[in-house]
Amino acid sequence: MAKASGGATQNTLILCEHPPTYTLGKSGDPANMLFRPEAVGAAFHQISRGGDITYHGPGQLVVYPIFDLDSLGLGPAAFVAALEDTIIFLLADYGLTATRLDGAPGIWLDAATAPRKICAVGLKISRGCTMHGIALNINTDLRYFNYIVPCGLPDKAVTSMQRELGRELDFIAVRTAFEQKLQQVLPITLS
């Protein structure tokens, strides 16, 4: 609102966990929801971000960057790449080698051989301001992904840091590491 009226903008970063929730992006296919969400105790929302259907829930770090790209001197592609780089660098600190996968948004492990998505990316950018964001599976209950075709990709798996490392992680420590990495990748200071 402030930008549209010519006022100053303030970049805001929201980091959270959600209760079990499914979201379907504006271009998503409802056929990729293989059940009724209430049957497994989850909420459902159709939203304006890009992408198809995904799950959000406990143990997953959901990041909502509400940023004015002009203030960062970035275009949309560079901003998305910066978010992806942040996750790639974070996962490397935990011994996980992550990459992008052509034609499939998000961050992936073993992209060339047995692709497993560990972080979903679904953004909307309007008037140079970002909305929605990313979701990193830390200690996420992956069974909830069995009820959907995650991100509309039937031949791809979903994973978590916990599954890959064989142990539960300290959620707050991972969240803090994300904030530190983001400040290294983007010209921002978080207070």
Image: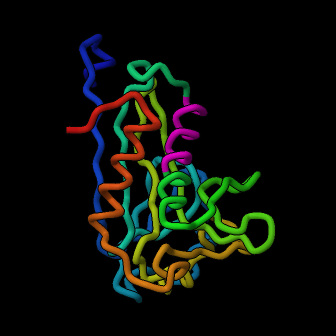
On the image, the x and y values in percent for residue 161 come to 49, 73
- What colouring does the structure picture have? rainbow
On the image, the x and y values in percent for residue 51 come to 58, 54
Locate the C terminus by quadrant.
Answer: top left
Q: Determine which quarter of the picture holds residue 189.
A: top left
Tally the numbered discs.
Answer: 0
Q: In this rendering, is residue 172 above or below 162?
A: above
Q: Which residues fall within the magenta stretch?
A: 76-86
Q: Inspect the magenta stretch and tell me whether residue 71 lies in it.
A: no
Left or right of 138? Residue 164 is right
Q: Residue furthest left?
A: 191
Q: In this rendering, is residue 127 above or below 22?
A: above
Q: Residue furthest right?
A: 113
Left or right of 80? Residue 71 is left
Locate the N terminus by quadrant.
Answer: top left
Q: Residue at horizontal 73%, vertical 64%? A: 111
Q: Nearer the viewer, residue 116 or 20?
A: 116
Q: Residue at horizontal 38%, vertical 82%? A: 168
On the image, the x and y values in percent for residue 100 come to 67, 53
Q: Residue at horizontal 52%, vertical 34%? A: 79
Q: Inspect the magenta stretch and tell me whether residue 82 lies in it.
A: yes
On the image, the x and y values in percent for residue 29 come to 62, 63
Q: Determine which quarter of the picture holds residue 96.
A: bottom right
